[in-house]
Amino acid sequence: MPVIKSAKKALKVSLRRKEENDLVRAKIKSAVKGLKIAVADKKDDAVTLLSKAYKELDLAAKKHVIHKNKAARLKSRLSLKLAKSATAEIVPAKKAKTAKKK
């Protein structure tokens, strides 16, 4: 059976797009992982890493590499993680109140 020219061209296009999408996904993963590590280590540059992760997620959603709701969900989770670590650092744990005996 002969190979159709348009099928060859479509294959080349899909392979090129896959490579581009894989690069975008790799950027997302590295940005998110870097932020998670910074939050775990309580580093000062976590806020700048959050903005970098936001940028990568927004770009991927714009290019339709990931769904826009997935990008929003990941951004929300990352900001919550950063906020939790910041509040845990600032506010010390409260002591449990003991019940008074009458």
Image (cartoon, rainbow, N blue to C red):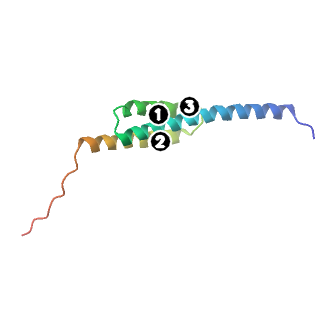
Name the element at disc 2. Answer: helix
Q: Residue at x 51, y 32 (%)?
A: 56
Disc 1, disc 2: CB below 8 Å? Answer: yes
Q: Do residues under tags 1 and 3 come within 8 Å of each other at their CB atoms?
A: no
Q: Residues within 10 Å of mark 2 (few under 14, many from 20)?
A: some
Question: Spatial distance from mark 1 to mark 3, Cα to Cα?
Answer: 14 Å
Query: For the residues carrying marks 1 and 3, which lies nearer the camera in this image?
Result: 1
Q: Position of residue 6 (x, y in %)?
A: 83, 32
Q: Residues within 10 Å of mark 3 (few under 14, many from 20)?
A: few
* Amino acid type at mark 3: Lys
Separation of disc 1 and disc 2 at Cα?
9 Å
> Residue at the spot x=35%, y=35% of the render?
43
Residue name at image x 64 percent, y 31 percent: 20
What number is the disc on residue 74?
Answer: 2
Residues 69 and 77: in front is 77
Can you identify the residue that label 3 sits on? 62
Of all residues shown, which one is farthest toward the bottom? Answer: 102
Front-most of residues 44 and 87: 44
Spot the residue most to the left. 102
Question: Image quarter for residue 67?
Answer: top right
Instruction: Please provide percent x and percent y for residue 31.
Output: 48, 35
Q: Amino acid at mark 1?
A: Ala
* Point 8% across, 68% down: residue: 101
Q: Earlier in the sequence, mark 3 or mark 2?
A: 3
Element assignment for label 1: helix
Please provide percent x and percent y for residue 86. Answer: 30, 40
Residue type, numbered disc 2: Leu
Mark positioned earlier in the residue sequence (1 or 3): 1
**In the image, which is nearer the foreground, mark 1 or mark 2?**
1
Q: Which mark is residue 53?
A: 1
